[in-house]
Amino acid sequence: MKINFDSEHDVMRITFQEGEYEMSKEVEDGIVVDMTKDNQIIAIEILDVSHRIPKTNLKEFAMKVSG
C-alpha cells in the first residue's frame, strides 16, 4: 500500500495495488474509488483533502510517509 499527498493539487491517493483501473466511481463528493474490471479496488483518491483533514495533521502525515 502506498499513500501519496500532493499538496499542490490538494489530493491524497491511497494505492492498494498496482495496475490499470477500468472505472472510477465517486462514492461521495470528492471521494473517488478506482476499480478493475473485476471490481477490485486499486486506489482511493480524496480531493480537497485539506478541507477534510486539519492541515496540521496533513503536515505530520506527510512527514511520516516520506520518512
Image: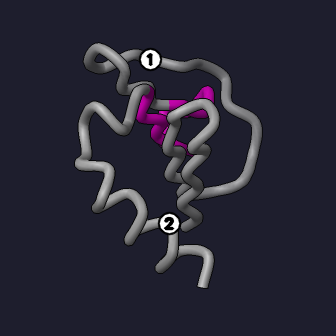
Q: Residue at x 59, y 19 (%)?
A: 23
- The number of numbered discs placed on residues in the rendered structure image is 2
For label 2, the SS is: helix
Residue extent of the magenta highlight: 34-47
Q: Residue at x 61, y 27 (%)?
A: 37
Number of the label disc, if any, that sits on residue 11 = none
Q: Position of residue 26 (x, y in %)?
A: 39, 16
The residue that disc 1 covers is 25
**Callout 2, which amino acid?**
Ala
Relative to residue 8, is residue 13 drawn left or right? left
Q: In the visual, does 9 lie left or right of 32?
A: right
- The residue nearer to you, when weighing 57 against 39, is 57
Vertical arrangement, residue 28 with respect to residue 65, above or below: above
Image quadrant in which the C terminus is located: bottom right
For marks 1 and 2, give the CA distance: 26 Å
Residue 43 x/y as whole percent: 53, 43
Which residue appears farthest toward the front when viewing the image?
A: 56
Going from N to C along the chain, the mark reached first, 1 or 2, is 1
Res 62 label: 2
Q: Which residue occupies the foreground of this view, 47 or 39?
A: 47
Q: x and y percent of residue 17 in the render?
A: 62, 57
Is 44 covered by the magenta stretch?
yes
